[in-house]
Structures are given as C-alpha cells and as structure tokens.
Amino acid sequence: MIWQVADLLRGDFRPAEYGRVILPFTVLRRLDAVLIPTRDKVLKEKAKWESKGIDPMPFMEKAAGLKFVNTSDFTLKDVLGDPDNLTQNLSAYINAFSPTARDIFDHFRFAEQTDRLAKANLLYLVLEKFVGFDLSDKAVDNHQMGQVFEELIRKFSEASNETAGEHFTPREVIKLMVNLIFAEDDDLLTPGNPAVRTIYDPTAGTGGMLSVAEEFLLDHNPDARLTMFGQELNPESYAICKADMLIRNQDVSNIRLGNTLSDDELADYKFDYMLSNPPFGVEWKKVEKAVRAEHEKLGYDGRFGPGLPRISDGSMLFLLHLVHKMRPAKDGGARFGIVLNGSPLFTGAAGSGESEIRRFVLEEDLVEAIIALPTDMFFNTGIATYVWVLTNRKPKNRKGRVQLIDASSFWQKMRKSLGSKRKEMGEDDITLVTRLFRDAQDAQLATITTADGAQTREVVAKGAEPPEAPEGGKVRLAPLSRIFRNEDFGYQTITVERPQRDEDGNIILGQRGKAKGKPMPDSSLRDTENVPLDEDIHAYFKCEVLPHAPDAWIDEARTKIGYEIPFNRYFYVFEPPRPLAEIDADLKDVTAKIMAMLEELSV
C-alpha cells in the first residue's frame, strides 16, 4: 500500500526522488500512530510539570513508554482536517516532536519536500494516503515495521544505482557477515537466555547491517537484547538510519552524524560486535590532517598507531578504527566483520603502511578468517570483495591460525541486474559458508562432471574420501577452506648488494668512516629478495643467492619484515592442457561440420 503512493508522485518527482517523500512520511505516520494511545496522558504530564517550572520531557516519555513524544494538540488526522492551513499545521506538528525525532525530519529536509508537494498540489493527497494507513504497533509490531522500512529503502535504493552504491549493502552479504560474527557465541543464541550485547557500525548508511543483526538475533533468541550504535557521514542516510532505529525502539542518541575517521563521535565506547562496509578505493585526503595528527601524537594509544595506508584508499583506516573499538579480551572480547576489496590483502611492500597494518593484526592474532565473495555482488562495483572476520577472543583451536575460505563460486545469477550487481548468494550458500567457518578446518570442493556434461558439487571435509568419478566423467578437486599459521603470511625483505668495480674489474673499497676498507655497493646492481619469515635469511642467501653472485652480501640495516595474504595463490589449481591429439581431433570434427553446412548452403 505504501509503495502505491509513488503513483501520485509520478511526473512531478523522478523515481530516484520518491524515497525522499515516502520514507519521511512513513516515519511520520508510524510515530503518529504509536503516540495516539498515550497522547492524553503525555499532554497531562506536560501541563503538570510545566506549571511547576520543571522540564516535563522525562515524565512525558515515561507516560508514552517511548523514547520520543509529540506535544502538539493535533494528530495527523487533525492536520488533514484543515486543508487551508495544511502546510503551517504540518510544520507545527513536526516541531512539536521531541528533539531526537525532530532531528530526523531536519536531516530528511522534510520542510523542502512538503513545500514542493504543496506547490504541485500533492501535499493533501499524499498526507491523506498516509493517514489512511494503520501503522499502529497493534497492527504492525516493531519487528514488522523495521522490515517494511528496510523493504522501502531497498526499493528506492534500487531505483537509483548511485544511491544504492553509496549506502546500501546487499542483504545476503549482510546476512553472511551477521552469521559469521554470531557463529561462535552459543551463549547469546541460546533461546531463553536474556543476554545483552552491543553492536556498532562506523559506516552505518541506512542502518541495514544493524537491523539485520537484530533480526537474526531475535529469530534465534527472542529474550536477547542488542543495543545498536552507529555513525554516518551522509545526512540523508543518517536520517533514514535514525528513523529505522526509532521505529525499532532503539536509543537513537546512539546514532551519530559525522566523519568517523576525523571525528569519532563515540570515542569512549567499546563494543561486543561490529560490522562495516566502508567505501572501496576512496581517498582520505579530506581527513588526512586529522588522521596523521592522531597517528603521530597518540601512536598506539590512538586508532592509527600501526601505520597509514596510501592516500588513494582509506578502507584499512576503518579496519584499524574497528580494532580500536573492540571490547578488551579481559571484559569478554569482541568480534567484527568488515567488507574490503582485494587491495588490503597484498598492497604495499614490507615497511609500508598497509604491510604494517597487516603485520599488526596478524601478530596480535586478531584475524580469524577471510572469505572471498563472488564478483558482481555490489550495486556500484563488480570487483572481487572479501569479508574479514577479526576477534580478540579466539577459541583454542583457532589461536595462531587464520582460515581462508573461497566462496567466490557460491552464487546464482539474478533475474535482473541492478547496476553492477548481477549475482546473489542464496540461503544455502550462506549456510554452507557459515558451516565451513564453524568447522574451522581444511575442506575441498569436488566438482563432479558426468559423461553428458552435467555438473554437481560436493564439499569434501578434511580426511574424507572424495567422490568417485562417474563412468565417462571426471571429478575436479579444488581447495575450499584452508587453515594457515599467522607467520605463514610474513616474510623478510633482504637487500642484496654487489660491489662497485673500476674499469679493470677491481672492487672499489671505501676510504672513510665505517665504510673504510669495505666494498662499496653498486646501487645499479642492488636487488631485494623476500624470504619466508620462518626461514633463516643467511641460509637462504647462501643457498639461493651466492651460487649466482659470489661477491654479494646482505645489507642487514635494510632488512624489513612484511606481511601479505596472496589469497588467489592459495586457491589456484593447475589444469594441464588437453593432449594435442585430442585438440586436433576436435578441430577436425568442427571443420568437417562447417564444410558440411557450407555445402548445404551452396546447393
């Protein structure tokens, strides 16, 4: 019914603008409907405490049983009853909301939208439609209303691919991330256990990640409580997120507006769970001054102590921000999931900001798993993406280990593309990846091809026998889940020097200081070698370098430790080419068919 309001707007508003009208009006009608039963009690409390010179707000909120009130003498139905003063009365009604709710409409720029509707002679018609919707909590509970609101956001986000890319993460990606961060918290998911946890999203967008996390938890344990926190940069997305939280009866003061990197509005908070989908490949030049100042002045006491990535991509800054926000292990610890592109896995040589950040999270044993997602999963990019799961409360079997899961083949094609999004993960795919994560062991994917070309797939757990190939068919095995030690991703970059030589080929020796009497290095012959972290550099040098360059030596002062996670290398499976005779036979067969077709055409 709500979606049908778009029919009224067609022509005067572009499809991408429908949400700017329908979303705030949906919020307005919901707030109006849930306030009606306690309206008289609230107004009595207002009169009582104002007459005594005391702020009535806490007493009014208590009377309403909500975190917001409206002190107007009108309801929306009353506003609709005076068409001649509709714009003024609606504005007065909005201004009568408590500050937390009124702030939502300010950031929706609701006054601009109502003026535009009034000029198009649509304000009365739109308001009449919404007044006719029964959005009371008896007809639609908070959980259902949250789902209605999320569905509206999805529809309007999909109507504008640009908007979708900015603040809308595909639901199946969020579901997977939520499954992963809650997977090992049996205490929280046990039905009947009144557990209380906090969850935070530093790039909250419209609040989708927070709301899906709450839905997941309540489905498993209705007695649990999840307190939500978030920060968002875009004012309109912030308003949508805050409205969604208000509808879900969350404390909207926990949702903040501003740039998370330069101005952390929740600086003193630590959280149990966190989720984030920061922008990919977006430079952080606008906040460079504030970020560098924190890095240099606070070091590891601040958020960015380990290092700073290159200016062209700030996604790893959000990774560090979330690490800083983790509840200490002694207080129960934390777990978070963050979506990143491929760059943070390997960009940057030893000693660079990116490498130092990877070094920090791996040496601190924070990285629990990294899952490769299918390409073409997001609205505004088709690139490869990865979910990183980090925690400071690893179970015993995961300590010192990192699990890599290649879920890039678990997808189905969408019936209709949405921008760059052409693929989606089904419920079975999400369940399978979650199970692989919980099992925390090596596994393979067996692709079984029959003689007629039909394919099926089967997960082969560690120690299990792979399926036998059908007659005339074959079985292809590929790694699906792999467990590595943290140090497997580390390496030492050694600098190999060769001596300068004069015209006669004699080595040139230094004449001054510490270099006196020692061979002078030739910068044009300088080279570097990456040596695995658990291998002795001198043994490596003796075995791999000296046989080819007997006059070389290691410049010990230049040795650096680096970390990278070459994900694709670990999951690459070599497939030998077919025998030439087989290829030749296929070519002859195809050529014969073409010749036969040409002969038919010439007849």
Image (cartoon, grey):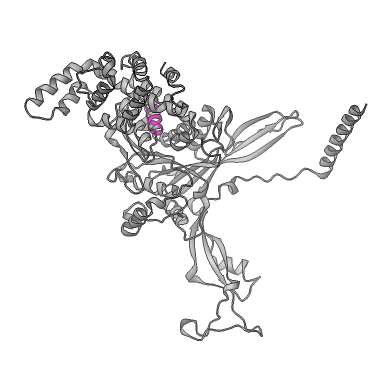
x, y (%) of residue 457? 63, 31
Answer left or right for 161 relative to 117. Answer: right
Span colored in magenta: 208-215
Q: Residue at x 44, y 17 (%)?
A: 4
Instruction: Spot the residue most to the right.
Output: 603
Q: In the rendered image, which quarter is residue 236 located in?
A: top left
Residues 516 and 85: in front is 85
Q: In the rendered image, which quarter is residue 481 located in?
A: top right
Quick check: can you spot residue 271?
yes
- Figure check: 99 above or below 515: above
x, y (%) of residue 173? 48, 34
Count of marks, rendered view: 0
Q: Main secondary structure of the magenta part?
A: helix
Q: In the rendered image, which quarter is residue 237 located in?
A: top left
Q: Quadrant of the N terminus?
A: top left
x, y (%) of residue 252? 28, 32
Residues 507 and 331: in front is 507
- Figure check: 562 above or below 465: below
- Figure check: 266 above or below 308: above
Instruction: Spot the residue most to the left.
Output: 52
Does residue 209 show up magenta in the picture?
A: yes
x, y (%) of residue 105? 30, 29
Answer left or right for 547 relative to 258. Answer: right
Does residue 496 show up magenta in the picture?
A: no
Quick check: can you spot residue 533?
no
Residues 66 and 274: in front is 66
Answer left or right for 271 relative to 37. Answer: right
Q: Residue at x 56, y 47 (%)?
A: 567
